[in-house]
Amino acid sequence: SLNQLISTINGFLWSSVIIALLVGAGFYFTVRTRAVQIRYFGRMFQLIAHTAGRKTEGNEVSPFQAFCVSTASRVGVGNIAGIAIAIVSGGPGAIFWMWFIAVIGSATGFVESTLAQLYKVPREDGNGFRGGPAYYLKNGLGHRIWAALFAILISVTYGMIYNSVQSNTISLALNHALGLDRMMVGGVVTVLAMLVICGGMGRVARVTEWMVPIMAGIYIVVALGIMLYNITEMPHVFYIILRDAFDWQAVFGGGMGAAVLTGFKRGLFSNEAGEGTAPFAHGCSIVPHPVDEGITGVAEVFIDTLVICSITALVVGTTGMYTSGHPATVMALESFGTVWAPLKHAGTFALLIFCFTTLMGQWWNAAKSFTYAFGENVTSKLRYIFPFLCIIGATTKITVVWSLQDVAMGLVVIPNMIALAILWPQVAAKTKEYFATHDK
């Protein structure tokens, strides 16, 4: 009954409201910024590389650390299990629509990351900054109540629901690969999360700073090896993705069509553009100009969807695993094992690291919201509770977990996108100022 109720809410949110907001805003911001996500593609990585390895103290956050924390929040179960779920639910054509929403959505990511810099506030101890959607809702729009309600909604979304998705996937993967008890897995994840989270936000930033490049590097190298091994299948995979994406019944049948809806939902869950999560990390970093951080915010969407998600889709496609009948949550892992059995364990390891770093990024987002809504003292106590929710997620039925995250995702998108539309003039002014200098 709960799952049916959640599905009904999902159907309403995702059949029209969220699609219109995301696609409309993505197109609008792409046009108004003159496709900043494409024109400043090279500078995007220059800005990130320039601050890599910069030493920080206490709660100070460098742009590279902000990039890693925000990427950690994005790159997780959605990049591996979520891709397989998208293919099973919406067909191979769903991958094309994930690419589509990532390209136009990256302009939205630019806007929200720039706003985070415009309306960030110094920490009470003078050591670093605080930022996020609640701050531009309060300081930009002057809506304290709206800001507080949004902070509470984000707190629940990231502190409870998204947490469950990651721990659920970790437990299912280890149960499938090694036969480990899911409750025991949840307990181990809880202990590991506690060790990092209880060290404060500075420790979360430093842990993700070195874990994110390692996890992405291992996964990309192994996946590219599998794709090269099956290189002859690559043209056919691209063919079926494009064929199904533009198939009349796939696109327009059943409302907006399974391919489009699934691609948009799984794409947003993975890259989070417009969801209001990137501003938490990007509002904390120290940069010479707000637009610099906005450009950095584009990189995470690109890496998350157009690189890692695409690699997973191509691995599942070239190995033919999408027609195997395996459960979607372990389909990508089984794809790794088709070339050489031990590689399945490499895929499992990458998934575990992805999910764990995402937990860290999600705690960052939840903690920033908790602090805004309830104060530092409450947040300092909640950091001892958050890890234990991993046990609940690890043992919950998977259909309920994923349906809940879709509802939560839709509910946070709506108020954030409305705020971005209203505050766009402030971003436009800073963007014009920045372009006048850097386009010469």
Image (cartoon, rainbow, N blue to C red):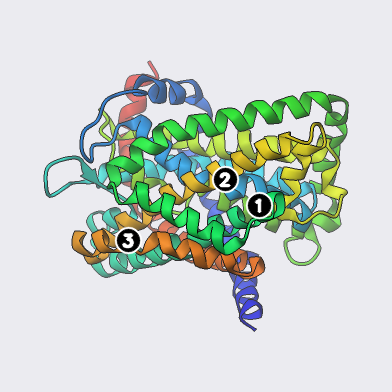
The local secondary structure at tag 1 comes to: helix
Counting from the top left corner in percent of width and height, residue 62 is at 30, 31
Residue bearing the label numbered 3: 384
Q: 32 or 266: which is nearer to us? A: 266
Counting from the top left corner in percent of width and height, residue 434 is at 33, 28
The mark that comes first in sequence, 2 or 3, is: 2
The local secondary structure at tag 3 comes to: loop
Task: Tell me the amino acid under the disc marked 1.
Answer: Ala
Q: 31 or 207: which is nearer to us? A: 207
The mark that comes first in sequence, 2 or 1, is: 1
**Disc sitting over residue 405 in the figure:** none
**Whole-number angstrom distance, CA of label 2 to CA of label 3:** 22 Å
Counting from the top left corner in percent of width and height, residue 70 is at 43, 42
The local secondary structure at tag 2 comes to: helix
Q: At x 65% / y 71%, what residue is drawn?
A: 11
Residue bearing the label numbered 1: 173
Residue bearing the label numbered 2: 352
The mark that comes first in sequence, 1 or 3, is: 1
**Whole-number angstrom distance, CA of label 2 to CA of label 1:** 8 Å
Left or right: 211, with 219 as reference point: left
